[in-house]
Image (spheres, helix red, strand yellow):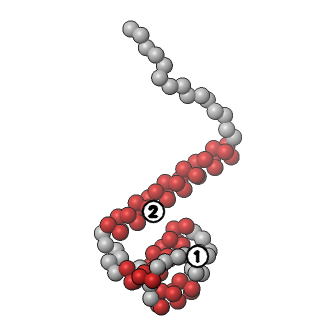
Amino acid sequence: MFCRKIFHIETVTISLAEYNALKQAVIDLQQLVDSLQEEIRLLKNGRNRNDRNALSPIALEAKFNLDIERMTILADKGFFNSRHFQTCIDNNIT
């Protein structure tokens, strides 16, 4: 019986710091995927049926998920009203 090698895996040596950084990157990536899957689930279930009231809730959630201090967004006029502007400004979203 003839067998052939289909793939080859090389051994790679990395430091403990590199291993820990890689491990954290994988964890961060999984958290991002989980967050995006939750967003898709919420959108499919009609969380924001009224687009006119969508800007500040979505912007605040994105800022929280990205864990950033300030954020600049761009939205067309169908997604907000003046109340949303003030909420965004109060939360360093411009």
Q: Which residue appears farthest toward the left when viewing the image? A: 45
Q: Position of residue 75 (x, y in %)?
A: 49, 77
Residue in the image at 58% along x and 52% along y = 25
Q: Which residue is mark 1?
A: 72
Residue 41 to residue 11: above or below:
below
In terms of sequence position, does the residue under pointer 1 or pointer 2 come before the other? 2
Kind of residue sitting beneath label 2: Ser
Between residue 79 and residue 3, name the one nearer to us: 79
Q: Amino acid at mark 1?
A: Thr
Q: Which residue is mark 2?
A: 35
Q: CA distance from mark 1 to mark 2?
A: 20 Å
**Residue at 32% over, 66% down:** 44
Q: How many marks?
A: 2
Q: Bin the neighbour count of mark 1 within 10 Å (Cα to Cα): few under 14, some 14-19, many 20 and up.
A: few
* Side (left or right) of 62 relative to 50: right
The numbered disc on residue 15 is none
Which of the 4 image quarters holds residue 68? bottom right
Q: Secondary structure at mark 2?
A: helix
Looking at the rendered image, the quarter that the C terminus falls into is: bottom right
**Quadrant where the image shows the N terminus:** top left
Residue 59: percent from left, percent from top: 49, 76
Secondary element under disc 1, as helix, strand or loop, is: loop
Front: mark 1 or 2: 1
Quadrant of the rendered image containing residue 19? top right
Residue 53 in the image, given as x and y percentages of width and height: 40, 83
Q: Residue furthest bottom?
A: 82
Position of 84 with respect to 90 (left or right) is: left
Q: Residue at x 54, y 56 (%)?
A: 28
Residue 80 as seen in the image, left or right of residue 68: left
Seen from the viewer's position, the closer of residues 18 and 58 is 58
